[in-house]
Amino acid sequence: MIMDDRLTTLRAMADSSPEPLVRAWAINELFKFNEHHDEHGRFAESDGPSRADTRLWNRVEKQGGFTNQPFSGENPKTGFALSLFPEREEAIKCAEFDPGDIHTYIGANKDALKQEGNYLGAWHDVETGIVYLDVSKITPSADEAFRLCQQYSQEGYYDLGTTSTVITKDEAERRRTVVEGVQGHG
């Protein structure tokens, strides 16, 4: 929460301070929080994965996934994350997943990821060996998350508070989805 307050203050200073030196300092501080931003605090295009992409990739490797707002750097800690945009989901074989996949996904979906309340989600389904990337939303209740998973044909949702995945599809339906949707690099 303190980090969110600091980021809000820095954004306000970068956007509206009458003092050029204060604006420059605030932009520099914001840049430290999110390496997807250029020296003006705006989203920066690049040809390859950034250190931020690599850090997110490491979170998939070590923690099984993440929920992150790539343009603000926010990592929410409460609520229930799920994808409401099945058409934007990407499934990648874990053995072929690398930081470039995150970089490419952010670039291809930046219109949706820049919208208020949208996050980049990643989940490594260890049972299937698939990493899913998606545009996620966060709901305040598990009941609402379950209902939305059913409505949008989602595998499940992620409980940010307990850091656990809740599967909402039965096993046969999950296998059918995996066979139909997996992509590889080859």
Image (tube, rainbow, N blue to C red):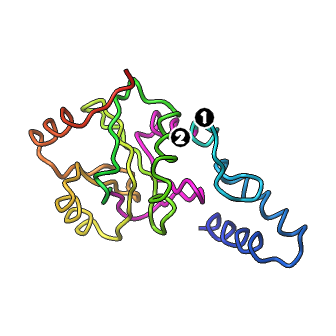
Quadrant (top left, top right, bottom left, bottom right) of the N terminus: bottom right
Is 76 a magenta residue?
yes
* Contact between labelled residues 1 and 2, with CB atoms less than 8 Å apart: yes
Vertical order, 175 against 185 (above or below): below
Q: Report the residue at 80% width, 57% height from top.
A: 28
Which quadrant does the C terminus fall into? top left
Which amino acid, by three-letter code, is at mark 2?
Answer: His
Q: Amino acid at mark 1?
A: Gly
Q: Which residues are magenta?
A: 55-82
Q: Left or right: 100 with respect to 94? A: right
Above or below — where is 129 with respect to 5?
Answer: above
- Report which residue position mark 1 lands on: 48
Q: Position of residue 86 (x, y in %)?
A: 28, 52
Observer-nearest of 176 and 7? 176
Specify few, some or many for label 1: CA neighbours under 10 Å numbering under 14, 14-19, or 20 or more. Answer: few
The residue under label 2 is 103
Q: Quadrant for residue 183, please give it.
A: top left
